Amino acid sequence: MTDECRAPDASARPRATVPEATVARLPVYLRALHSLADSGRTTVSSEALAGASGVGSAKLRKDLSHLGSYGTRGVGYDVQELVVHISGALGLGQSWPVVLVGVGNLGHALAGYGGFDDRGFSMAALFDLDAARIGERIGEQVVRHVDEIDDAVRTLGPCIGVIATPAPAAQGVCDRLVSAGVRSILNFAPVLLRVPAGVDVRKVDLSHELQILSFHQQRRSALTLVEDAPRARA
Amino acid sequence: MTDECRAPDASARPRATVPEATVARLPVYLRALHSLADSGRTTVSSEALAGASGVGSAKLRKDLSHLGSYGTRGVGYDVQELVVHISGALGLGQSWPVVLVGVGNLGHALAGYGGFDDRGFSMAALFDLDAARIGERIGEQVVRHVDEIDDAVRTLGPCIGVIATPAPAAQGVCDRLVSAGVRSILNFAPVLLRVPAGVDVRKVDLSHELQILSFHQQRRSALTLVEDAPRARA
DNA sequence: TTTTGTGAAATGATTCACAGCC
DNA sequence: GGCTGTGAATCATTTCACAAAA
């Protein structure tokens, strides 16, 4: 991701550049902070927040330092203030519309999932290719035909596309989303999507996750065997 | 992850240590290889396989070199042979049983998803806490009460646990899985699970993925604004 | 005294570029 | 001539450890 295009007057803006690894942890911190806030905490130390987030405190502090300097030495961080700054960095001030394509098994579950409206996202439109599903009502939305994506996206403005179709349909759907102007895509279909530069795709792949777990499980088993019978040879 | 416990005779075994980043890409290569095999290819160059996997060819070769030396200079890799070696490294020789806890919206979709039986995994048992759901038939399995996890896991042997419960129930379910002996867990609930050392947890979190997309989308928007009106000031 | 923020060191991952083999 | 396998160089991330602030 090209990054050298800071405006010449980038003085006291949110931040110029945040490492990718840090970005991936900000949602974790944000969730921990919300849960701290719910339980009445008003301030928190890097040690405590790191504990609640499952990371080391040095890493947490370094991560936060990329957003700015929002703590008080000797005291810690103000919970509300940190929520505001992390939310801001993540662009959660506004509520991004999410358009979901593919309301099969998984799509249904995603459409019904509260997690969208949770913080900063709203399920704004549902699409499917299958004529039999058009018109079905799910939550607050009615399923529309995929041909209407263009119109919908034009109306909604910048939004996030979620693909929950079967694998063979995914690339076609992706192309439509992209040509409608969607530049952020979350893909649940088990295929590699090809997109032009400037479009950001993240994938969620059940089978990949299981395979990674399998790798470690196997390695553990192998080690256990070796340790259990270390003198079975020479 | 502790790694210094190689057996003293680790001579020509599959491999001693594979970087985590590499492990995460092996499933991608495997999928690309399967699709090449389906279309009749018998050999493939690092360049071509890398292309089909969305990575650079140098990275692909370095990744494969961690598993061993299975290519032929001047020619490339034998598709079938690579499939065998990568599958082997990932522990997909056997078919791991998967036990799923929580058959709500999402759990249903996961239980019905073909991806499990796809390669190397089989949906072996379904559980729920809600008495109303016990006995329901989904695919080949009948939903059982979560109290039966112990028995089931003892019968199945090493397996992978999938948690698809609402957030508040997840830690309790996780504890049960762990005490039943499950050491690999895939968590779809939006909470950080605490597990003892030696248990491997991976999480899939819709809301985190959206937030990461949101970050980049916002950054893009900001840059576009700056570029579109670069002389709006001094 | 407590706890942040951050340079500097250590570790890990990616990319380069080419020697070695087919 | 073409392509793999891999040291060496680069780049990114994590960890350490401590000076500076409240």
Image (cartoon, coloured by chain):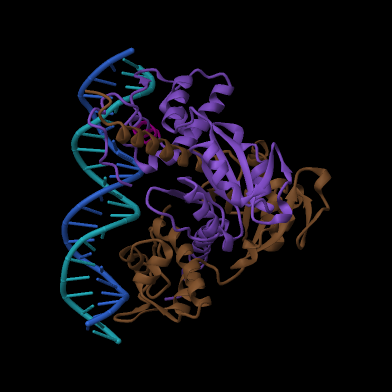
Chain colours: A brown, B purple, C blue, D cyan
* In magenta stretch: residue B60: yes
Return the x and y of residue B73 as percentages of the image width and height: 34, 19
The quadrant of the picture occupied by the C terminus of chain A is top left
Q: Is residue A179 visible?
A: no
Q: Is residue A140 above or below residue B86?
A: below
Return the x and y of residue A53 as percentages of the image width and height: 43, 64
Stretch in magenta: B57-63
Nearer the observer, A189 or B114: B114
Judged left or right of residue A89, residue B133 is: right
Q: Is residue A95 above or below residue B21?
A: below
Q: Quadrant of residue A124?
A: bottom right
Identified at 35% across, 33% down, the residue is: A225
Q: Is residue D11 above or below residue A19?
A: above
Identified at 58% across, 60% down, the residue is: B169
Return the x and y of residue A13 as percentages of the image width and height: 42, 73
Q: Quadrant of residue B63?
A: top left
Nearer the observer, A55 or A199: A55
Q: Quadrant of residue A182?
A: bottom right
Judged left or right of residue A34, residue B108 is: right
Identified at 30% across, 65% down, the residue is: A58
Query: How many marks on residues?
Result: 0
Nearer the observer, D15 or A134: D15
Q: Main secondary structure of the magenta part?
A: helix
* In magenta stretch: residue A163: no
Nearer the observer, B87 or A99: B87
Return the x and y of residue B104 as percentages of the image width and height: 68, 53
Q: Is residue A59 visible?
A: yes
